[in-house]
Image: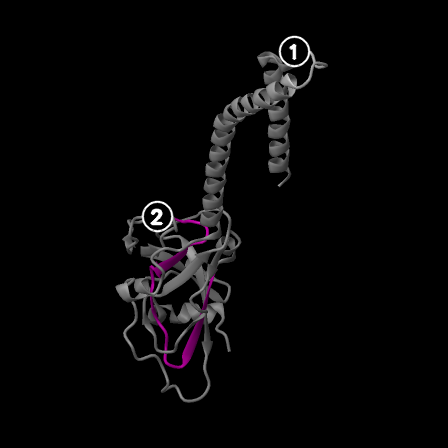
């Protein structure tokens, strides 16, 4: 059976350190962000990510699509005949921060909690050391209480935890930025090709037109010589080139 708020209050000294009655939220207790955090590296980052120590109320940012380990400020001691459940507060969860580390604390656990979270939202999530971030519930277990957690609990975010997270995490936001950068480079190359290629194409077209037209004129006396002048042929070649460029631009815009 889950504990009521009054039962949590009566047993706070044996459960949590530090603690305060004002942090009881109905039948749950509010846990706070501690002094250490780890945030996974963005796919474009070149700097190694390490656990970061925080001052009281120091702010930090979890970018979209990135993981983080958050250490609780409170030290928790769960009795051997009790199980605890944890989750992110709804006010923070609605911003896109979700718990990915599991939702329970084993009977007999003693130490701080290291909670894995993921920013599934579209914007960075800013938190501070000391922020109320998690809720914890307690429930009695029936049966033999001899099966409980026997390992030392966490007091910090150790290197073993960090090594389980990819050193570079490519998020959807990172992919979107890369695609945007690729599009800009493609547009630049296209503009260079058009800027350099069009004058070259005009010159080649005029030269070829003059050569073939001159040969045709030499074998024909019914065609006025003005049709094969350099200016006229340049105008014709330029018009054809403009039509060709407009066709290319239209196809590019339609994609």
Q: Quadrant of residue 12?
A: bottom left
Crowd class of label 1 (few under 14; some 14 to 19; many from 20; radius 10 Å) = few
- Secondary structure of the residue carrying tag 2 is loop
Can residue 190 be seen here? The reply is: yes
Provide the major secondary structure of the magenta segment: strand
Point 60% across, 18% down: residue: 214
Residue 61 location (% of width, % of height): 39, 48
Q: Nearer the viewer, residue 180 or 223?
A: 223
Find residue 67 and report its image quarter.
Answer: bottom left
Numbered range of the magenta stretch: 61-88
**Residue 238 visible, this orientation:** no
Q: Residue furthest bottom?
A: 144
Would you name the residue on which mark 2 appears?
45
Position of 240 compared to 18: left or right?
Answer: right
> Residue 48: image x %, image y %?
29, 52
Residue at x 30% of width, y 49% of height: 56
Q: Secondary structure at mark 1?
A: helix
> Would residue 137 be counted in the magenta stretch?
no
Residue plotted at (51% across, 78% down): 1
Name the spot of residue 93 as percent of width and height, x first: 50, 56
Q: Which residue is mark 1?
A: 225
Pick whichever, 125 or 29, lies toward us.
125
Asked if the stretch drawn in magenta spans residue 83, the answer is: yes
In the picture as drawn, the residue positioned furthest to the front comes out as 219
Identity of the residue drawn at 61% across and 24% down = 242
Q: Is residue 2 above or below residue 243?
A: below
């Amino acid at each position: 059976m889950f504990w009521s708020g009054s039962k949590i209050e009566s047993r706070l000294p044996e459960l949590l350190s530090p603690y305060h009655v004002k942090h009881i939220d109905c039948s749950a207790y509010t846990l706070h962000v501690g002094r250490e955090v780890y945030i996974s590296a963005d796919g474009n980052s070149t700097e190694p990510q390490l656990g970061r120590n925080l001052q009281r109320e120091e702010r930090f940012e979890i970018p979209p699509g990135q993981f983080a380990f958050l250490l609780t400020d409170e030290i928790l001691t769960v009795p051997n005949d009790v199980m605890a459940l944890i989750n992110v507060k709804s006010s923070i969860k609605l911003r896109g921060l979700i718990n990915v580390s599991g939702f329970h604390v084993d009977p007999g656990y003693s130490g701080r909690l290291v909670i894995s979270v993921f920013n599934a939202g579209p914007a960075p999530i800013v938190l501070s050391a000391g922020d109320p971030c998690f809720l914890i519930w307690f429930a009695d277990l029936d049966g033999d209480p001899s099966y409980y957690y026997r390992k030392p609990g966490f007091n910090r975010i150790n290197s073993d935890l960090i090594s389980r997270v990819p050193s570079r995490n490519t998020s959807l936001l990172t992919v979107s930025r890369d695609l945007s950068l690729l599009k800009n480079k493609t547009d630049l190359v296209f503009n260079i090709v058009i800027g350099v290629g069009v004058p070259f194409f005009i010159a080649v077209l005029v030269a070829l037109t003059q050569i073939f037209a001159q040969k045709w004129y030499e074998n024909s006396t019914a065609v006025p010589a003005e049709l094969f002048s350099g200016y006229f042929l340049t105008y014709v070649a330029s018009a054809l080139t403009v039509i060709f460029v407009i066709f290319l631009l239209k196809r590019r815009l339609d994609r």
